[in-house]
Amino acid sequence: MDIDRFWQFIETARSSAATVGKPLDEVLVSLLADHPPQEILEYAARFDEVHDDLYRWDVWAAAYLIGGGCSDDSFIDFRAGVIALGREWYERTAAGPDSLADHPAVVEAAQAHHGEALFYEDMNYVASSAFERLTGDPDAFYAAWAGYRPTDEHVHAEADMGEDFDFDDAEEMHRRLPRLARLHLGPSI
């Protein structure tokens, strides 16, 4: 599955979810379950690729600010949430995580002082849930995935996360993510 087809699935599900008033992950599961198992595996491979591409310190710092902290597991869910925003926001975030300061859900969460924005755990399980719905077997996806070897996937030997820095250093956060830091920490000192 090429990257455009992957994003087409996401955008179609986003549009349908807004229309029918159901959670995006549920709509996406239904959409994928109408396709052959191979295509679900290809979707899973692309999801992993775009998910892995956000595995960077600057993106993690954005998640830390937005969530009021961010564990390893929460960072997995945050990256899934960025994917759930669609291609435009994904690409903006990948280019510069500070751009999330413009996203309405991030602004609303900051004003309400809650850190739930963009953390979307269920998006991580869409492919396995679609596979289960298609086959009726809760273990079928994992068995198929173990045998699946995509030929055109990029592989991260060792992820280049960029430069590590202290997320608890407000001055550093203001320097690296000025708009998000101002939104979540207040003005720089």
Image (spheres, helix red, strand yellow):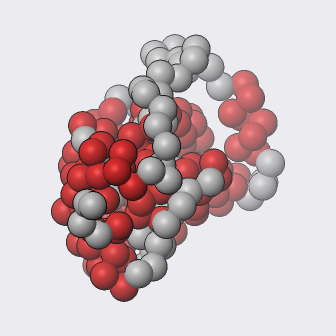
Camera-nearest residue between 27 and 92: 92
Residue at left 76%, top 45%? 140
The spot of residue 150 in percent (x, y) is 55, 20
Camera-nearest residue between 137 and 169: 169
The spot of residue 4 in percent (x, y) is 28, 36
In the picture, which quadrant includes the C terminus?
bottom left
Residue at left 35%, top 67%? 185
Residue 46 visible within the image? no
Q: State which quadrant residue 176 falls in.
A: top left
Q: Is residue 141 left or right of residue 110?
A: right
Camera-nearest residue between 78 and 23: 78
Residue 176 visible within the image? yes
Camera-nearest residue between 10 and 54: 54
The spot of residue 80 in percent (x, y) is 48, 52
The spot of residue 17 in percent (x, y) is 36, 72
Q: State which quadrant residue 58 falls in.
A: top left
Residue at left 69%, top 55%? 132
Q: Is residue 116 above or below residue 44?
A: below
